[in-house]
């Protein structure tokens, strides 16, 4: 069924762009239920997001005053992905300090 396909597809694949992942999940959600609530789509998107981006995206979405939409998710996740791609070591070092674990970038 489509619902099973959505549950199985949920994870962003290695090497898969964020936009491709976003489009695929959005399409599957609409196929399962054309009236699926936006917050459920955002939940599916967050749950399957690559590990290195997930915590940063969730943190920003929780800080929003409004309920997050798939469009908000896309903007935040793309910004986070761009930061990660351009400066992965620095990005990792800075944001892991929030967990109490400090990693220094290797130069």
Image: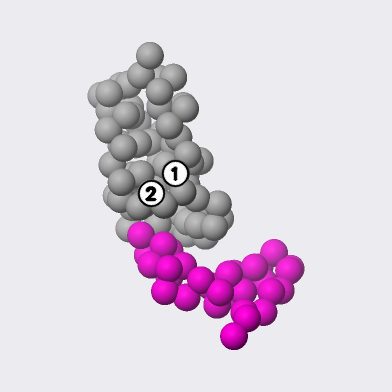
What is the quadrant of residue 21 in the picture? top left
In the image, residue 19 lies in the stretch drawn in magenta: no
Please tell me whether residue 47 is drawn above or below residue 97 in the rendered image: above
Residue holding disc 1: 12
Residue holding disc 2: 16
Q: Dot 1, crowdedness within 10 Å: few (<14), some or many (≥20)?
A: many
- In screen coordinates, is 38 left or right of 54? left
Q: Is residue 63 visible?
A: no
Q: Secondary structure at mark 2?
A: loop
Q: List x then y, in percent, for residue 18.
A: 36, 52
Q: List x then y, in percent, for residue 11.
A: 47, 39
The residue most toward the right is 100
Q: Which mark is residue 74?
A: none
The residue most toward the top is 1
Report the front residue among 44 and 17.
Answer: 17
Q: List x then y, in percent, for residue 42.
A: 40, 41
Could you tell me how far apart the alpha carbons at marks 1 and 2 are, in whole angstroms?
7 Å
In the image, residue 99 lies in the stretch drawn in magenta: yes
Q: List x then y, in percent, for residue 95.
A: 59, 69
In what quadrant of the picture does the N terminus appear? top left
Magenta residues, start to end: 78-107
Q: Secondary structure at mark 1?
A: loop
Q: Are marks 1 and 2 in contact (CB under 8 Å)?
A: yes
Please tell me whether residue 91 is drawn above or below residue 28 in the rendered image: below
Q: Dot 2, crowdedness within 10 Å: few (<14), some or many (≥20)?
A: few
Number of marks in picture: 2
- Residue placed at 43% from the left, 68% from the top? 85
What is the quadrant of residue 32 in the picture? top left
- Residue placed at 51% from the left, 71% from the top? 88
Report the front residue among 37 and 1.
Answer: 1
């Amino acid at each position: 069924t489509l619902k099973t396909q959505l549950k199985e597809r949920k994870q962003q694949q290695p090497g898969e762009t964020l936009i491709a992942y976003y489009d695929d999940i959005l399409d599957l959600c609409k196929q399962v239920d054309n009236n699926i609530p936006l917050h459920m789509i955002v939940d599916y998107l967050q749950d399957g997001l690559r590990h290195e981006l997930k915590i940063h995206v969730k943190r920003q979405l929780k800080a929003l005053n409004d309920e997050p939409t798939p469009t908000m998710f896309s903007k935040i996740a793309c910004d986070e992905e761009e930061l990660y791609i351009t400066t992965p070591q620095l990005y990792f070092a800075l944001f892991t300090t929030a967990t109490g674990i400090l990693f220094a970038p290797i130069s």
